[in-house]
Image (tube, rainbow, N blue to C red):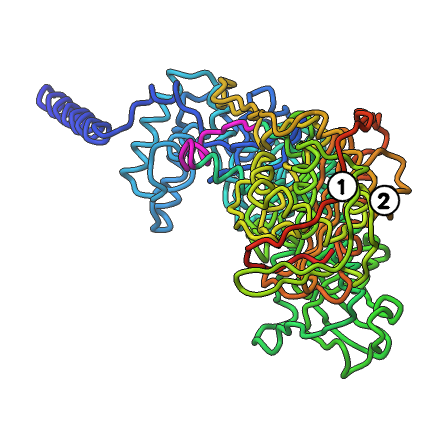
Amino acid sequence: MGLVLFGLLTLLSAAVGAAAGLLLVYSTDLPQVEQLERYRPISVTELYDGQGRVIGTFALQRRVIATYDDYPEVLRNALISIEDKDFYRHSGIDIWRIAGAAYRDIEFGGKVQGASTLTMQLARNLFLSPDRSFYRKVQEALLAIQIERRFTKPQIFTLYANQIFLGHGAYGFEAASEYYFSKPAKQLKLEEAALLAGLPKAPQYYSPIAHPERAVKRRNLVLNAMLEDGKITAAQAADAKSKPILPNLQKDPNSLAPHYVEEIRRYLEAKYGSDQVHESGLRVYTSLDMDLQKSARQALLDGLAAYERRHGWHGKLVNVITQGQKLDTYEDPDWDEEPEVNGYTHALVTQVSPGAAEVRFGQRKATLSQAEVAWTKLKLKPPGMLRAGDIVYIKVLAPDAGGKSRVSLEQDSGAEGALVAIDNATGEIKAMVGGRDFNLSKFNRATQALRQVGSSFKPYVYTAVIDQGGSPDDTILDAPVTFQTASGPYSPHNYDGKFEGTITLRRALAQSRNIPALKLADHVGIKTVIDYAHRFGITSNIPAYLPVALGSAEITPLEQTSAFSVFPNDGVHVAPRYITKVTDYEGRILEEDYSDIKDAVSSRTARIMTSMLREVVLHGTAAAAAKMPYPLAGKTGTTNDFTDAWFVGFSPSLTCGVWIGYDEKKSLGEKETGARAALPIWMQFMNVALAGKEPGDFPAAPAPGNTGGAQKKVDTPDVAPGDGETH
């Protein structure tokens, strides 16, 4: 008997020693759980507009860190019922679940799997590889025990709920709730909470977007588990099961102002590094106004659509069938975002019959009738202007009604545009549209496109004259003139081919007369004019040729718009800015930005020039804006061959610049002047931007003094002509 007992004790000691040895081996390279006390998951860097609304994000993982109380009881109950019923009772591992899972794996010849508690899943997600080996399972259990000893159950649940992957780039239940349902987790209904709770098992397999049928089955399984645990009643379970899955996908905030957001990304990465920008959850407070941005984008797209219609149907559509793609599987990049009413998108023609064409865009469908394409002056009939497989550009006029949206046919011939709006007093960029479609072109025409500015350059000529003692009432002769240059005689002309004789400087600017501008530039010296342009914040290199006075200089829309803000700002230039403040995730300020301010010209000169530019709107080339009920001023600009159309104008509080043209610098078409192509866009935007606000007024210009006449004999300049501007 003694020998038997001795033998049993020896075997027990050996078993204990072996187990201890195994535990020692498995625990030697375990990470330190203490790291969790300082751990913060990778989180989203968020960009806010001036009212604190999110306009963009940067992240490797879409994650919004939440607290335990941010997760409602219905979500906590759903997750625990399906993933870990004894979460609040066990100490990190569930022996009976592990034993049962191990028995089933042995029975079916598989590896150890299943039976993981929430704590074990947390340990695996944070510290271990995803492989399902016995070695990893033991480490997972050991780490779970350590986590349970150091943290409370609410802390463990919160760490898990913020960390877990839930499909489509969403990490954590707060981010998943916002992505799938466009609302915070606190507002989840029972059926929504159950759906999210079912995702950790296999996020892609049970995706409510990609596999709604599987998602329904998994959600109902969660509801059954909650019913078994007494967390919900049978009536509640039945009601929740009857509800269809209706994801309300969160719109990508970056889509509102993609060019603007991209500018900020480049700046932040250059200053803080890519890792900190995409992983550390910075908080970036910008100058943008979300409402003004929406209005700016709408105005630009509407203006481009109007331009396209004026020039008729070009056709030349891309056809996906000829490219070897199928109608039922084609997906367009535009369809990543739900189109808004009055929004523009690309659509796929699926069928054409006499008088109608069926189109699809994302999950939506619409019919183009003859009325919607009447502006093309072509008939809808096969074979004709449209065929199945064509990619067309449409405007969404009304949302789904009876399963179909109402749309109009538009055209994208490649014409582009840019719009910038700047607060005069602060230099804050309130709106920026860098092109028609960011998906098609990341090039930001507002900040990167150097374009000839046409007659919108002339205010710098007149500023130089006024600042050197001239008066708006001085006169100059608008008559034929020839300048002798090194490359031969240069005989400029006015846009209308006519001459007005002796006119005041005020009228010469308002009517954008070319001859007076050239004479004045020659009188004060083109280098002096260029110096004034640089005082206004223009940094582009401007060659010292006389035709620069007519706008052959190439300047970006942002610089030109910022420069014009000097006039309503009483001669002060406030450098444009995107960012007001950057903080880390805990709110510590990393930087606060203030605009550089400098005097450009005297307040006298600025006020006189403002009154002259006001005349452009009241009686000059921008007279179409005279009916707007606000004090406004500005200048049109058109270049030779109508390659660029501009209007840059301002109210007492806001300056806005609009440019229209082709990237390849081809003609917009006959008579596509700044007044015709750009001004309507500016008017549409400014009408919305100024509506309901106190318009204020411009400071009064000083009374005219005896400054002497500007009418002088224009000496022949010895300069080489460049591409002059026409209007």
Whether residue 122 sits left or right of residue 710 in the image: it is left
Whether residue 268 sits left or right of residue 210 in the image: it is left
Instruction: Name the residue at 17% across, 29% down.
Output: 18
Instruction: Name the residue at 67% across, 28% down.
Output: 571
Please state the horizontal and vertical placement of residue 336, each as a whole percent of the image: 63, 52
Q: Which residue is mark 2?
A: 625
| Quarter of the figure with the N terminus | top left
Q: Is residue 263 above or below residue 36?
A: below
Instruction: Name the residue at 58% across, 63% down.
Output: 664
Please state the horizontal and vertical placement of residue 468, each as a whole percent of the image: 66, 32
Marks 2,1: beta carbons within 8 A: yes
Whether residue 397 sits left or right of residue 79 in the image: it is right
Callout 1 amino acid: Gly
- Going from N to C along the chain, the mark reached first, 2 or 1, is 2
Q: Which residue is mark 1?
A: 634
Q: Is residue 32 above or below residue 667?
A: above
Callout 2 amino acid: Ala
Using the rendered image of the protein, determine whether residue 220 is visible from the camera's viewpoint: no
Q: Nearer the viewer, residue 348 or 501?
A: 501
Segment colored magenta: 270-284
Please state the horizontal and vertical placement of residue 170, each as a whole percent of the image: 54, 40
Question: What is the residue that sits farthest to the left in this orientation?
Answer: 3
Instruction: Name the magenta segment's main secondary structure.
Output: helix
Please state the horizontal and vertical placement of residue 373, each as a whole percent of the image: 83, 69
Disc 1 secondary structure class: strand
Using the rendered image of the protein, determine whether residue 248 is visible from the camera's viewpoint: yes
Q: Nearer the viewer, residue 481 or 152?
A: 481
In magenta stretch: residue 280: yes
* Crowding near the residue tagged with mark 2, few <14, some 14–19, many ≥20 C-alpha atoms within 10 Å: many
